[in-house]
Image: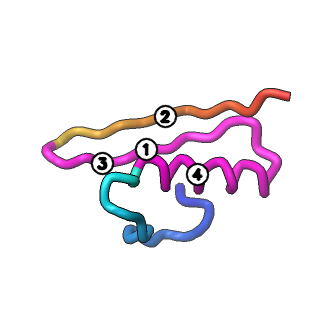
Amino acid sequence: VNVNGGAVALGHPIGATGARILTTLLYAMEARGARRGLASLCIGGGEALAMVVERVP
């Protein structure tokens, strides 16, 4: 679930998709006071990536 809406086009420079998604996740976690977050990415050809992030005090 994208907590900021449902747009597919995020607007990022070529080759920086992972950094763009991770940075967006970190800002969303901070804004909501979340401890854990999950970022996922479809990379085509039936493959996907996922990353779980945890903020530690």
Q: Position of residue 42 (x, y in %)?
A: 30, 48
Please state the extent of the stretch shown in magenta in the rendering: 18-45
Q: Amino acid at mark 2?
A: Met
Q: Are marks 3 and 1 in contact (CB under 8 Å)?
A: yes
| Circle 2: element type | strand
* 10 Å crowding of disc 1: few (<14), some (14-19), many (20+): few
* Residue drawn at the location 35% of the way across and 37% of the way down: 49
Quadrant containing the C terminus is: top right
25 lies left or right of 21: right
Q: Nearer the viewer, residue 41 or 15?
A: 15
* Placement of 3 over or under 26, stated as above or below: below
| Circle 1: element type | strand
Q: Amino acid at mark 3?
A: Cys
Q: Are marks 2 and 1 in contact (CB under 8 Å)?
A: yes
Q: Which mark is residue 42?
A: 3
* Residue drawn at the location 75% of the way across and 36% of the way down: 35
